[in-house]
Structure formats: C-alpha cells, structure tokens
Amino acid sequence: MTTYIARRIAMLIVVLIGMSLLTFIISHAIPGDPVRLAAGPHAGPEQIESLRKQLGFDKPLPVQYLMYISDLLHGDMGTSIETRKPVREEVLTYLPATAELSIFALLISVAIGLPLGVVSATRKNTFIDNGGRIASLLGASTPIFWLGLLLQLLFYKKLGLLPIGGRIGIELNPPAHITGFYIIDSILSGDWLALKSSILHLILPAFTLGYGSMAVFTRMTRSSILEVLNEDYIKTARAKGLSERVVIYKHALRNAILPVMTIIGLQFASLLGGAVLTETVFSWPGIGNYGVHAIMTLNFPAIMGVTLITTVIFVIVNLIVDISYAFIDPRIVYK
Amino acid sequence: MNKKTLLKFFKNPLNLIGTLIIIMLILVAVFAPYIAKFDPIEISMSDKLLPPGSRHLFGTDEMGRDIFSRIVYGARISLAVGIEVVTFAAVIGVILGGISGYFGGWIDEIIMRITDMFLSFPSFILAMAVAAALGPSLTNAVMAVSLTWWPWYTRIVRGQILALKEFEYVEAAKAIGNNDMKIIFKHILPNCISPVIVEATMDIGFAIQLTAGLSFIGLGAQPPTAEWGAMISTGRQYILSHWWYPTFPGMAILITVLGFNLIGDGLRDFLDPKTRKFTER
Amino acid sequence: MKKVRQFLVLLLILILCVSLVAGCAQSANKAPTNSKNTQENQTKVKNPDTMVVAYNDQPTTLDPHIAYDPESLQAISQVYEGLVTYKGGTNEVVPQLAERWETSSDGKVWTFYLKKNIKFTDGAPFNADAVKTSFERLLKINQGPAWMFDMIKSIDVVDEYTVKFNLEYAFVPFIHALANPSGPMIISPKAIKEHEENGDLAQNWLRQNMVGTGPYMLESWNMGQDFTLVKNPDYWGGWEGKHVSKVVYKVVQESSSQRLMLESGDADFANAIPRDVIEDLSKNPDITVQVDSTVNLLNLFFNNQRGALKDKRVRQAMAYGFSYDDCIKGVFNNLGKRMQGPLPPGMWAHDSTIKPYEKDVEKAKKLLEEAGYPGGKGLKFTIMVETGSEDYKKVAELFQSDMKELGIDISIQVLAWATIKDMLASAETAPDMFISGFYPDYLDPDNVLYALYSSRTIGSINESFYTNPQVDQLLEEARRSTDLAHREELYKRAQQIINDDCPAIFILVRDNITTMRSWVKGFVFHPILVNRYYFMYKE
C-alpha cells in the first residue's frame, strides 16, 4: 500500500512538471504583448521597455521558464501584468470562492444524484425511473450558461426567492476571514446573518454547476446498482430472508458505490471547468472568472496561475480518490 | 449487426427518439438552404430584435438577421464541429494507443505519461488555454477541443491491444514472419475500431457542448458566423427584454446534445453484455 | 406501449415547463407590477445613505499616478483631488485644491496659489511640497497618464502655499491637462514616504491603499466582488447639505443581472445595460435613463501604410460606401451624433464647415475604378475588433456587409485588445483596419488631433500610421501658440486636410447613457469627469 502511494506521488510530481511546461508553452504562444497593454495607450517605447524589465519579460524563454519554476518552488507565481499584484495573492483570494462553489455543487449533485440513482434502479422501468433518467439526461445536455440565466429569471425576478448573484448580500460584510469559505467562516465567527445570506447566494450557482454532474451520478449509480443486484451474494442475502431495504442499503449500495467514487474525481474536473461559465453568469468572484479575464487581457502569469492551480487541485483530488478507493476495496491489485 | 438486433435496439423508445433527433439534425444540416428562408448573415437594421412571428419564426437578432435561418445553418456548423473533433481525437488516439499498446516497454511508458499529463487537466480549462493561445477562431477551437479529447481514445485502444496482443493469431502471424506494421494494421487495429466508434458517437454531443462553451467566452466562432454558442453569448444580454434571442439557440444545443446522449446511452446499454439482459425484458 | 406513454407525458411536462419559463421571460417585458420586490420598494429608498454602483469590472489599481482605466478612476475620483477640475457639466476649469493661478507672458511658467488648511486623511498637511512630491512621483514612475505632463521641466516650491510649474514650451492646454481625472492627483507625501519599499515610491502600498484629500476614504476592497468607500469626516468641502456618506461598487458582470438589480433597487447605478434594452427600461418610473452628449469618438482606422490602403481614393471609397445612418440608428439607437471630420462636434475649434462623407455607392464605385480596382477587384482586408465589445462587433458586421456591395472582401477577427495593441506597434505588423474608440482626456483639440494624427505619435497613439507633414506642422505650431484665435485657425486647417485625406472613417460621437434609480438626485453628467458621488444624494 505504501509503495502504491509513493508511486502515485512520484507520478504526480512528474505530471506536475510536464503540466507546468505545457502551460508555460501555451500561455507564451498566445499572440500579443501584454506588457504593452499594461503600460497604457500612450506609452512610448522606453516606458514599455522599462516595464518589461521590471516584470522580467525581457529574458529568453527557457530562462524565463527556469526562473518561473524556481519561483514556483518558493511559492511565487509571478506578478499580474494588469494589477502588478503577485499572482499567488490574487489566485488565493479568488480560489476559496470557486472551491466553495464547486464543493457545494458536488454535494448537491451527489445528494440528489445518488438517491435518485438508487430509486431509479430499484424501481426500474417505472415512471420514476424513466422520469429520472430523462431529467438526468437533460442535465447532461443543457448548456450551463443557459440554465443559469433561466434559473435567475425564475427564482430572482419572478419569485423573488433567491438572490441574483454575488456571494453575499451587499448590505452585509463578508464574515471574518479565516478560511475564505463564507459558510465555514460565518459559523466560526457566529455571524448568522452572513451564514444565511451566503447559503442563499450559493444555491442557484451551485445547482446550475452541479446539474450536469447530478445526471452522471444518477446514471452511474443506477447501472452500478443494477449490476450489483445481480451478484450472488445479493441473491444469498435475499434468500436469507433479509428485508429488501437492508439488502439494498446495507449490501448493494456499499459495493455499488465503488465505481461511482472513481467518477467523483472526473466530475470534479468538469466542475472546475464548468465553474468558468457559471461564475460569469452569477458574478461569482472565483478563479474561473479571473481566468477568463486574464485570457482576454493576455495576462499570462495569471493564465498560468489559474491553469496550474486548477490542475494541481484536480490531480490531488484524484489522488485522494484513488487512494481511498484502494483502502475501501482491498481486492484491487496494484502492480 | 442484423435486422433483429436493430429492432431490439429501437424497442426502447429513448433510443428511437435519440436516433430520430440525429436524423432530423442531419437532414436540417444537409438541406439548410431549402429550409432557411433567409440568408443567415444578411443584415437588415430596420428589422432588428423582432419577436417571433410569421415572417421570422424565431425572431431576429440585433442586426436584423433571421434567427431561425441562423439556427438552421448553425446545425451544419455544430455537426461538422462535432464530427471533426471526434475524428481528430480518435485518429490521434488510435495512432498513439496503437503504438503504445503494441510496442510496450519504454515507448508505452512515455506515451502513457504524456497521456496522463493531458488527462490531468480539467478538459475545459485546457481547451480554453489552448484556444486562447492559438487565437480565436472556430478552427482553432476545434483543434483545442480535440487536443483535450485524444487521451481517452488512446487509453481505449491501448487497452484493447493489450488484450488482443496475447491472442494466438498474433503469435501465429508473427511466427509466419509478418512485420510489426502489417500485424498492427491488418490484425489488431480492425478489432479496436468498434469500441472507438461507439465512444466517438457518444462524444459528439460533448464536443458540441465544449465548443459552444468556448464560443460563449469568445474563443470560437467569429462574427458573423451563425454558431449556436456564439449566438447565446451575444444573446444573453437580451434575455430579459428579448427572450427569444438566447433561448432558441440554447434549445437547439439542448436537443442536439440530448439526441447524441440518448443514442450513446442506448448503445452503451445495448453493447454491454451485463446490462443487455435488462433491456431485453 | 406503456413506456411510450410515460415518455410522452414527461415530454409534455417538459414542454410546459419551458413555456412557463419562456412566459416568465415574456412577462418580464411588461412593467413588473405583480412582482413582489417592486411593489415594496416603489416609494421607499433602499440604503438611503449609500450609493450602490453596479459595475461590470473592477479597478486594476488605486494608484492615481498609474491608473488609466475607467474602473480604477471610479474609485480614485472619490478619494483624490487635483489642483483644478471642470465645473459641473461644462468645460470651464475651476479651482479645486488651488485657489487661483497665473501664467507667465511666455506661457512657460504656471504659478498656482493653493487653498489653505486642508489635510490628507492621514493627517499630513496639503501644501506646495505635497504638490511637488506628487508630480515628481508621477513623472518618475512614467506610466499610464504621465505622458500628458511630459512638458514639465521642473517644479518649484515658492512658499508653503505657492507652487510653480516650469514647462519646456508654452502649452496652453496645460490647465486642461491638470483638470483631467487621470494623473494629476495629489497623494499624501507622508504616505509616499512611509510606505516606500525598495525605491518603489510606495507603488506596492498605494496599489491597494488610498490617502487623499477627497470626500471619501477607502474602507474595503473585496477583490472581484465589491469596493466600499466611506465618508471622510474632515473633508475640507464640508458635509453640510445632502451627500451620500458611503459608496459601494459591486462587480456585476452580467448585464441582465445588472438590470435586475437596478429594477429591484439593489443598485442605484448600472453601467453595462445594453442600448437595445434601454427603451424598455425607460418605461419604468423608478428608473431614470439620461442621455448626454460626449466627446467620445468612434473611428474605423485604416492602416494608411498598407498596400491598397495607401491610396487615398481607396480609403475615400470605403468612407463613401459605409451606411452611417444604419449604424447610428440601428447599432446605436440614434444615441450619438455623426462626426464631421476628425474632431468631436462639441469641442472648441471644431470646423463646422467640413463636409462629412455620406453614403454614396456610385461615387464609391467610381473612386475604386479610378484607383485601379474596378468592382473592388482584388481588395481583401481583415478588420480587427476587440473582445468584449458588442458595439464594435456590430459596426464591423455592418461594414462587412456594406463593403460586399462594393465588391470588397472583409473578414472579421475578434482579438484581445492586448493582441491588437501589440500588433499596432509598427505599420508592418498592424492590422489592415480596426475599430477604435477614442476617449479624450481633456477638452482641447490638441488632445485629439495631436494624439491621433501627428507623425510623432506613430507607434503609441497614432494607430492609423497616418503622416502628413503639413498637418504635423500645423499641430506643432498650435500646441505652442498662446493666441487662441490663431490656434483655432490652425486647427481648422488641420481638420480640413485630415478629413480630405480620410485616414479613418469618422463614424460617430457616442452619447453616454446613464441608467440610475429615480431617487438619485444631484447627478450632473460630465464628458470627461467620472461621477462624483459627493454631489449626489438619494430621496
């Protein structure tokens, strides 16, 4: 087991290096000179050159890459061309918002998707099953940004139940910053108004973001359970006289969960990607938004920062999922 | 694949509907000039932002262009994009997967590491970064999405090959003296193709969605191209006052992707021997 | 059969749901009389002491000597002040931190007499020393707005409240440059000194902190979300009368979200509501839509050194082929005025006798033929448009369709502004043509003509690579002349020549549309200045 973990971590490092190289190449391939943009429309050549030197963009590319890597190892992701702030600071400022949104979205999609999948499987081919399958299929086919707009229209404009965007009401201050997660921070500082407001603000974007994943979970769970229900030990359990309920929840589910878990990691990837679109519609101050803005202004330290962070998170999440999978199912043999 | 299996496939109404949707899409794309009443890029400022009516079935956009015609022509683009992406991805994937699986050893290791590297990116983020680097255009968006998709095919093909490699007919072919290339192309690859094709069909829907997403943030189709994602992008600021503008392209994407997903689901259920028993009931 | 029936029922439910939502959207077109929110807030002012501004972007930096973008200026203009400013909605320069001023007879020395007993929010006194320190900092950092002041040779502190600017040459518009909102703001010298890091003149600290003399102070900046300014209780202008005591900027990127916030009263101002939606919005009695003229230009610049575009006739032909009416009416909903030559019609020294190009397809075709391109044969260009601008995209599409009529093939490329700007560094790499908005910094023709059409500024702000030695001479002379009548004459001659040379299609001067809640009072629009909320209140 430990060798497995060690191997995985070693692989992680190799992947991270390759990934940083790839990101570096990509963001430098972007045409255009962002230093010029930062210097302002009236800047003359000397102003631009001095700024370029200041930001370190005048050295040859391989040197820039090595400088970047060594900085990274010290935790420095370079300086944003637009704001002159350290990219690390900006990314860390925006990251908790995206993390909170993605986690909430994941929770919602699992909390609804899994039970729906179970019910779908156990009441196969009934109205609920087919209905659930169609709803989840729709979820996988709906463009996120479109869904977000429609939900805003319905719940904010028409029903006035939920806010239109942002993380918290404008009349309130964000809770005291401890983790950057508004829900956790407001609980920790006992700020109940902020807690309520944050939760209300999270509902629509998280639902929009998670809807697609919900579909996947429902489907996975359903087919996984169907598969498991056919196994011998289930037949044995039934023969033993155990109630259907126990059979399903105690035996079938536990084994059916495993393949679903492998999907969680992948779903997190699509959540991180989908966050970009969702954050735009709901004015959510996360790194997705920050990344799109960075692309539009050719702020390549920022672009690199966003890509790296999202990928690192994704890789780590997958690592954790894989390792937990190995713990849960000792039958898995690893080379 | 005989008539009986086809009938069994269509017994499930979802499969039938999915197929019908796809057929409709293809027909619309092929016969676009006959179905659309207007030129999709013809500007008519005096007709801008008209609601759906008898003349303009889905209304007009901010330049007076007929939205229905644009959606019809957009079907061509989306279909083309979907097929191009999966084709590129599949070709790259098959080649790399083939080499990797067949030769094994350090070639395999390197290709697998590269595959892992690409897979370690959330696909949309990678597509976004590559598309931004290449420059905004539909062609570049297609390439960007293909670049994020090929690893899956590589894995599938490699897995198939690893299984097939051990079969006796390969040993036999080797014994006769066939060289490696011939073995790969004549014996092994043909057996890998079908899972790739199945996967590719299911992926067309995702390819369309990803590209629409890129167009939505401005990295795909350029004006005045009538691409569905780009139309929603321009149309979103009008949703409260001219609801038809972003709604119809959104529905077009929804129905199209739904069609592919339905077929994909059906195919998956149908071809997987374990679940097939259940669909037979 | 049962399965099919179930499926059809589900499909029916789906269709009903979609029609319900579409119905919601449709009824949103009508006045929201049955929406819960509006009924409650029709008379009651929300957040009466706070001005909430919904903005679609956020400041990049709070340092007034570096910031050059409108979002940053929004914040800076509430906290920092300059020696002079513009009055109300006029182009008259009036005192702000300076009481009065005088110019030497040769126009090279400007003396300012400062107001007394003014303090910065960190307690430091405002005086001549502070002015000198600020301007020297601006010039030393030399970014963004600094170019407007490059004629300052030196600054002398005459006594505690008198300061002298020595210019390289007589520059009559100098006082206008000092009134503009980017650059000539006075920062507390104490703050600059105390937060200095490695010789950076406190740039790092002042990026996120503000110490000025203005009516508001920075309370908090939640990156990407909002920005809060609170009342500076010791403001020298005093707080008698009605002023809002707090200003909150909320970053709201979706224009539909901005609209909803404005309609519900959660925002008092919204900056990004599309023009096509404005008409609908103006029917709402709780919302005021105000349209004002500006001096903001919209030009379609040609690369005057590229191939066929070197020929004046080709450029003129395209100018004759463009549908100006369709553009102003269709794209801008008549919220703008046709340009007459390169200067905005509202500006001093504008020559109103200039004949603008009107759409005349016959004339255009003839010119093309004369130039050797009958039927537009062989003419193929790409026009660049920056990302994020719906307007520019529409104009480009219109232009494309117009040129098709002349047989000229135009393709559109949408790129990040940084890319386009980079390409504009030289005539060889520059695009064939692109759409550009020009926002004068201050109200003098020099700021427009010299910047855009002088050979000296090729590579920085002259983005059409136009050169005409006659024009150059006129502009240089006008810059340095102190005789107003003479200057006017020179500028008029220059305009005529530029108009005839047609380095660009002069499309329109855009109107500014302000969308705000009707309970906002005291709003006065200014074409150059950013909203100053100190002069506004809500009731």
Image (spheres, rainbow, N blue to C red):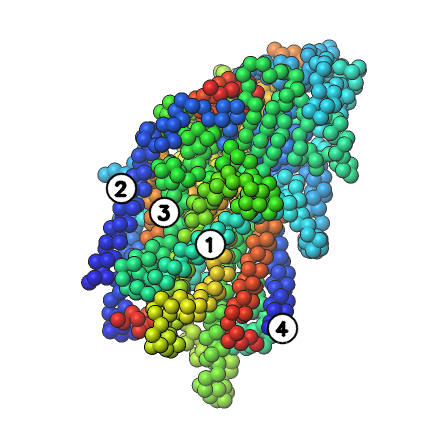
Between A25 and C9, the one nearer to me in the picture: C9
Residue on which disc 2 sits: B57
Task: Name the residue that disc number 1 marks.
Answer: A107
Chain letter of the residue carrying label 1: A
Q: Is residue C345 shown left or right of residue A128? A: right
User: Considering only vertical position in the picture, is A80 above or below A321?
Assistant: above
* Left or right of residue B162: residue B263: left
Q: Are marks 1 and 2 on the same chain?
A: no
- Give the residue type at disc 2: Leu
Q: Amino acid at mark 3?
A: Gly
Q: Secondary structure at mark 1?
A: helix
Q: Mark 4 — residue?
A: A3
Q: What's the CA distance linking mark 2 and mark 3?
A: 16 Å
Query: Marks 1 and 2, how far apart in space?
Result: 41 Å
Instruction: State how far apart marks 3 and 4 are (Cα).
Output: 49 Å
* Contact (Cβ within 8 Å) of mark 4 with mark 2: no
The relative height of residue C326 versus residue C6 in the rendered view (above or below) is above
Badge 3: chain ID: B
Residue C299 visible in rendering: no
Q: Amino acid at mark 1?
A: Leu
Q: Position of residue A261 (x, y in %)?
A: 48, 64
Residue C450 higher or lower than A194, as above or below: above
